[in-house]
Amino acid sequence: MRTLLLSASVSMAIALLGTPVAIRIFVRRGVGQEIQDELAAAGHASKRGTPTMGGIVIILASLAGYLAGHLLTADPMTASGLLVLFLMTGMGLVGFVDDFIKVFKRRSLGLRARQKLAGQIVVGAAFGIMALHFPNIYDLTPASDRLSFLTDFGIAIGPVFFVVWVILMTGGASNGVNLVDGLDGLATGACIAVLAAYVIIGNWQLRNVCTATLVQSCYHVRDPLDLAVVAGAVLGACSGFLWWNAPPARVFMGDVGALALGGALAGLAIVSRTELLLPILGGLFVIVTLSVIIQVIVFKVTRIRTGRPVRVFRMTPLQHHFRMLGWNETTIVVRFWLIGGIFVGTALAIFYVGWT
């Protein structure tokens, strides 16, 4: 528990104090956000030029907090914790390249969709392969090749299909967070709620791990406490960053932050054996992603059949639909946070009922 508290505290302090330093560096180097014409019309023109790529601070603060917590308590690092941080950093690197191209070429689009997808596949596949290795003395690996909800269930799907499943999960989570990251503080606050849930889940699994107690409702998780430490470190980094990212934002996290946070959430779900619980925990991300999918499908189908494309929403992702309706940005952010909190509370209730 001391490691958890120290890691979260250090990462939050670094993000809180380091973000304004990063803002000054970004401003000096002209690292500003480019705004699409549609978003400018929706009232986002004033955001053009706001420093972006602030997700670098989140990643560095998370890594430093995790390292400091373990060094100060002499608590050994674990394969599970390091793998989640690897996934987070790897996805962040893909986002960094995307952001760098946007800034360098002064345009709102960076990597091509196929290029970004290829980067996410490589990072996700590497994580999935390594997660099936590094057994501990109880022969538990960070992940298993079985699907999981509250715990593992069903038959093993084999390492190949498991890696494919991991690629789908990591890609879906990282892109989901990226889609939500459209208004000041929205994605950061939503991620904080899910990360807080994983701090609770990790601590609960530690107290009911099967290697310590052989009861019916125990958990076959390799390193539950260290997963709580990772979640706490990233939570602290996001909290410190949100101070500067809250409306009106002085800095944006960019793709480097959004993809990294999505990777962290997917990694925590996979190694804590709560893969299918993640869509409930991150229900807000699912809803926003579905809004984009529905818009694209309906638009294309109606254009083909009638020649007159129909839009279900005025603009997607969903938060921009409400912006086009005239809602105040802060109102949208707070209400979306509330929706995200409801999903997190529901998922935790399901997790607890599943244990009882």
Image (tube, grey):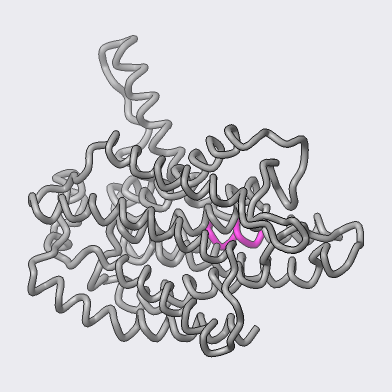
Q: Using the image, determine if residue 184 lies above or below residue 320.
A: below
Q: In the picture provided, is 14 more to the left or to the right than 42?
A: right
Q: Is residue 33 magenta?
A: no
Question: x%, y% of residue 7?
Answer: 51, 81
- The single residue placed furthest to the bottom in the displayed view is 72
| Range of magenta residues | 339-346
Residue 141 lies in quadrant? bottom right
Q: In the picture provided, is 73 more to the left or to the right than 354?
A: left
The one of 286 and 84 positioned closer to us in this rendering: 84
Residue 197 lies in quadrant? bottom right
Question: x%, y% of residue 344?
Answer: 60, 60
The one of 74 and 194 positioned closer to us in this rendering: 74
Residue at 49% in and 76% down: 66
Which quadrant is the C terminus positioned in? bottom right
The one of 284 and 278 positioned closer to us in this rendering: 278
Question: x%, y% of residue 269?
Answer: 60, 54
Residue at 52% in and 59% down: 83
Question: x%, y% of residue 176?
Answer: 43, 47
The one of 344 and 68 positioned closer to us in this rendering: 68
Residue at 61% in and 71% down: 226
Q: Using the image, determine if residue 161 lies above or below residue 257.
A: above
Which quadrant is the N terminus positioned in? bottom right
Q: Main secondary structure of the magenta part?
A: helix
Q: Is residue 344 magenta?
A: yes
- The single residue placed furthest to the top in the displayed view is 305
**Number of marks in the image?**
0
- The single residue placed furthest to the right in the displayed view is 215
